[in-house]
Image (cartoon, rainbow, N blue to C red):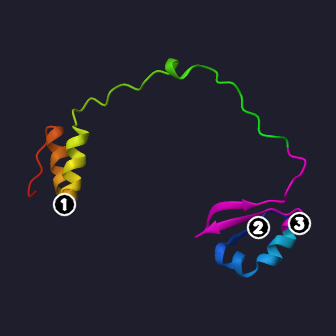
Amino acid sequence: MRKGRAPGVGIAKFKARLSEYLRAVRRGQPVTLLDRDTPVARVVPFDDERQPLSVRKPIRRLQDVPLPPPLGTRVDSLALLLEERSGDTHDAALALAARACGQEVMGV
């Protein structure tokens, strides 16, 4: 394990050396778990003194949040879904989406 900062360790290595990493966590060193060099989790020492989670009041009502503007294209999402589920998934959906946007797809 590296010293001085939270070590990053692959999942397989963490599993193989679980006891070693848990001892480090008990000593106060957090461990970052990596999945193909991407951090996915952090193991940190347990804190009995943590404050309970507080839920704040909303700053505005959901009804007051403005909706985004329409996309500007006329796409029948139900027709796309039905075409996708019919079997010719990629080509049929691509052709239907292109037609909805006023385009033509050749060879489909």
CB atoms at circles 1 and 2 under 8 Å apart?
no
Q: Which mark is residue 7?
A: 2
Look at discs 1 and 2 and give the one toward the viewer.
Answer: 1
Work out whether mark 2 precedes mark 3 in sequence or the reverse, and give the earlier one. 2
Residue that mark 3 sits on: 26
Q: Residue at x 36, y 25 (%)?
A: 69
Q: Residue at x 87, y 72 (%)?
A: 23
Mark 1 closeness class: few <14, some 14–19, many ≥20 residues within 10 Å:
few
CB atoms at circles 2 and 3 under 8 Å apart?
no
Give the percent coordinates (x, y) of residue 32: 72, 64
Give the percent coordinates (x, y) of residue 35: 60, 68
Q: Amino acid at mark 3?
A: Arg
Spatial distance from mark 2 to mark 3, Cα to Cα?
A: 14 Å
| 82 is higher (above) or lower (below) than 40 | above
Q: Amino acid at mark 2?
A: Pro
Mark 2 closeness class: few <14, some 14–19, many ≥20 residues within 10 Å:
some
Tell me the magenta residue range.
25-50
Work out whether mark 1 precedes mark 2 in sequence or the reverse, and give the earlier one. 2
Q: Amino acid at mark 1?
A: Gly
Q: Secondary structure at mark 2?
A: loop
